Amino acid sequence: MKLKSALVSLLAGVSFAGAVHAVDITGAGATFPYPIYAKWADAYKKATGNGMNYQSIGSGGGIKQITAKTVDFGASDAPMKGEDLEKNGLVQFPAIMGGVVPVYNLKGVKSGDIKLTGALLADIYLGKVKVWNDPAIAKLNPGVALPNQAISAVNRSDGSGTTFLFTNYLSKVSADWKSTIGEGTAVKWPTGVGGKGNEGVANYVARIDGSIGYVEYAYAKQNKLSYAQMFNKDGQVVAPSDNSFKAAAAGADWNSVPGMGVVLTEQPGKASWPITGASFILIHKVQEKPENAKEVLKFFEWSFKNGATMADELDYVPMPDPVVKQIQSVWKSQIKDASGKAVY
């Protein structure tokens, strides 16, 4: 009996030790990178036994949660400014890149048939261009059977980094948009209907005949939505793809902005997709739970090393190796425990 009791105690101790060793981490924020973070988390769990629970709630929600310290890391497609990072004691680094694409639902018009300029896209969202056979659309799309049908513009109703990238781009290509609406994670939309998350916008566009919306490319593919081709800064017509996103990201100078907060919209280059962006991770400089912070960094270290093929499969652009080295040097120098010891 004593032997049995001792064995039970020993097994309980082993189980407890295993539970302590396995650190599950939590993150929240941008819906833009959710498909790849979910895929990485699943593969990481199988490889290490450690879990990563990510809430796809929008960039605004992610910033609020990490600021309030209710999650181990936040995620935002709108990079925080240097002064805001400093004020909130946060470190920021890019984790993945991808593209925002205009998507539409138009009977008889195939994916890629519609071509748009940034200025025309702005006029549609401003409510100036109201029907699909408007002369401005017809001029860019000769030979496409455009219906005399009202355009239903779908936007994001929540605070969103995808909206930041979209409105940042529109502000660069349309003086009217810049002066009347501007850019931000949330703006006062002049027209249209709002959906929550990339998921909500994708669902609305799939349901509403005559609609146009904007989503991260993985959501367009997953929901089999038709996407528009775009005229880029060099005047070339480009389709969204990992190659056109990579072309836009190729010239990024990550040291040019505090917190590596580079915005990749309207980049030069014949092959560049004009609405490309990075998604950023936010983590506190001083860690009250250093073990959790260490696990967050281990998760992204593993993902940078092992997740490139998974990223390519979902048409995201993984961070290049030289940029990963920059990111890791930031981890080493800036993220510390309460005693000042480096976590990474």
Image (cartoon, helix red, strand yellow):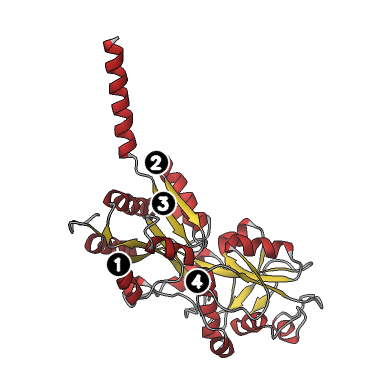
Q: Dot 4: within a 10 Å radius of its alpha carbon, few (fewer than 14), some, or many (20 or more) residues?
A: many
Q: Is mark 1 on a helix, strand or loop?
A: loop
Residue at the (56%, 60%) spot, across then down: 218
Amino acid residing under circle 1: Gly
- Please say if 66 is above or below 167: above
Nearer-N-terminus badge (4/2): 2
Cα distance in 3D space between marks 1 and 4: 28 Å
- Would you say residue 337 is visible in this rendering? yes
- Please say if 117 is above or below 16: below
Amino acid residing under circle 2: Ala
Q: Are marks 3 and 4 in contact (CB under 8 Å)?
A: no
Task: Residue under label 1, please give it.
Answer: 89
Q: Which one is in front in this view, the residue at disc 1 or the one at disc 4?
A: 1
Q: Dot 1: within a 10 Å radius of its alpha carbon, few (fewer than 14), some, or many (20 or more) residues?
A: some
Cα distance in 3D space between marks 1 and 3: 19 Å
Task: Residue under label 4, please give it.
Answer: 276
Nearer-N-terminus badge (1/2): 2
Amino acid residing under circle 3: Thr
Q: Which mark is residue 47?
A: 2
Q: Which one is in front in this view, the residue at disc 1 or the one at disc 2?
A: 1
Q: Which mark is residue 26?
A: 3
Nearer-N-terminus badge (1/3): 3
The N terminus lies in which quarter of the figure?
top left
Q: Which one is in front in this view, the residue at disc 3 or the one at disc 2?
A: 3
Amino acid residing under circle 4: Thr
Q: What element carries label 4?
A: strand
State left or right for residue 261 relative to residue 312. left
Residue 304 found in image quarter: bottom left
Residue 7 found in image quarter: top left
Cα distance in 3D space between marks 1 and 2: 32 Å
Cα distance in 3D space between marks 3 and 4: 27 Å
